[in-house]
Image: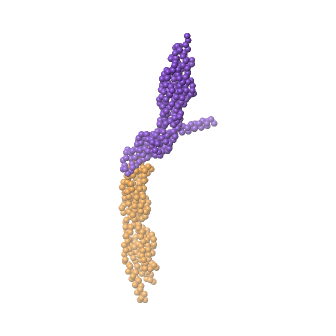
Amino acid sequence: MKSLLKVLMIFAGALLFTNVQAQNSGTSPYAGSTHTYTITKSSIAATTLAWTISGGTSGTDFNFVGATDGTSVQVQWLATGTYTLQVAETRTDLAPALSGCPTTRTISVTVTNNTFDVLASLDTAADACATVSNPVTDVSADGNNSDDVFGTTTRTYTVSMSGGDAAKTWSFDYAVSDIATSDNVAGVLVNGVAALSGTINVPANTASQTITVVYNTNKNTVGTNGQDPDFAISLTISNAKDELGTPDSNAGNNLATYNVKAVPATTGITTD
Amino acid sequence: MKTNFTKLLSVCFFLLLGYGVMAQDIRSVGETHAYTVTPENGSNTFAWTVSGSQGSDWAITAGALDQASVTINWQKPGTYNLSFTETEAHGGLNCSTRKTATVTVNADFDVVIADAAIALNCATPAATTDVTFVLTKTNGDNDWTFDYTTVGLGTELTGNDVAASGGTHNLVISLNNVSDGSDQTFKVQISDVKDSFGNLTVSGDEETSNVTIYGLPNTGNITF
């Protein structure tokens, strides 16, 4: 019985994988994606190529990206529907009355709704205290916080992709707000790099990407004794797309915010 | 007695008066024509004779040799003597009148093949491209045969004893399209054209002008 269950699970997994592979392909692209189509030209030297699309309107339903007279053509599909992509190879060495003895090749393309979605989410509770290494050592025993180590505060976000073709790379821009390097001199690290904004390219077959914001607690150059304010550390992602240019279909889940409550920047204990 | 004998002589005289009246008739080979006389008396006996051989040179298609009208299909060229004799019996005496005609059957069976309607054309996307040549027959029998061959192809297309019927025949050459998109130029020759009587055409072998079928570009499938 257990073996049967395992077989069924493997079968279901295989079906799921097959379905994923069929997503956003050249013949069933997502609206908004750009695909490349290619033919092998004939052995006749004197020919020209012309790519056309029927069943829709250029600029509304699709756009050719670049030239339409080469062995490859790029098409950005804009609207759902069924279209016919055609290429005609026409001889140029014949009398005009023969119309070039053209050979045409066609494929049917069904453009479907775009389900490619990139979303930002929190790995831990939204509201929590900054991290402090209690008890905080008073390094110079002088009541001065400047050389005391309160510890590091870390917040981790996960940026996930769903509904797209897992076999393709994808990318997004990110920006971390309400915290700045000027506020926390020692370090705001995003994805291992001290940058509050940038572009992340995610390899194929990778469903999610972690972004970690790290700063030294209570090392604020503005607050008294390094006192941090409460931070609302937001991660905003934008311009998400896969390698086919398929855009993010849902902009409503591109923002995730941690509300980090400051810990007191108490000085070292002094005595008389 | 004298009176009856005189009358009989008078009848024979007028019957014999028609002897030796000649007629000339010219026909095409394969043509069918009716020959008719108006007999003096329908109860007399009639007899047609035709030189040559019945069944090979000519054939009766209607009427009969012992009737006032006979329809003859002329199957071979030549000159034929056609004779009609009407005999009236008068007791023991038969009095006959004979009419003759000469029929000349011309050797004019012929078949010509026309050039293709379009000398320069594109191949089709199918496995073959059909090119039609029209053969036109004049005279001879309704049924006829011919041989043909293409000239100019790598592997020639041929046919032997191709059956045709009627005045025209469409010879369709199904040219095998080549996968590399190259052009093919050829013409068609016909030979041994004969009707069912065995008559050969007067013009002999025929051939068309060249036809060129331009290959379609062998464009590969769209991949993505």
Q: Quadrant of the C terminus of chain A?
A: top right
Total count of labels: 0
Q: Kindly give the residue lying farthest to the right in the view shown.
A: A1
Which residue extends farthest top?
A272
**Which quarter of the rendering shows the N terminus of chain A?**
top right
Q: Residue at x 40, y 87 (%)?
A: B6
Indicate how the structure is coloured in the image: by chain
Q: Residue at left 52%, top 38%?
A: A115
Q: Nearer the viewer, residue B133 or A148?
A: A148
Coordinates of residue A170 in the picture (x, y in percent) = 49, 34
Q: Is residue B220 above or below residue A226?
A: below
Q: Quadrant of residue B102?
A: bottom left
**Visible residue check, residue A161:** no
A129 lies left or right of A196: right
Q: Is B203 above or below relative to B183?
A: below
| Figure colour of chain A | purple
- The chain that appears orange in the image is B
Q: Which quadrant of the figure has residue B104?
A: bottom left
Q: Is residue B205 left or right of residue A205?
A: left
- Residue B149 lies in quadrant: bottom left
Of B169 and A253, which appears nearest the observer? A253
Identify the residue shown where x is 57% and y is 25%. A128
- In this rendering, is residue A48 above or below B156? above
Q: Which residue lies at the image location 41% right of the left edge and 89% below the top edge?
A: B2
Can residue B177 be seen in the rendering of this structure? yes
Residue B76 percent across, percent down from the top left: 39, 67
Q: Position of residue A75 (x, y in %)?
A: 45, 40
Q: Position of residue B212 (x, y in %)?
A: 38, 52
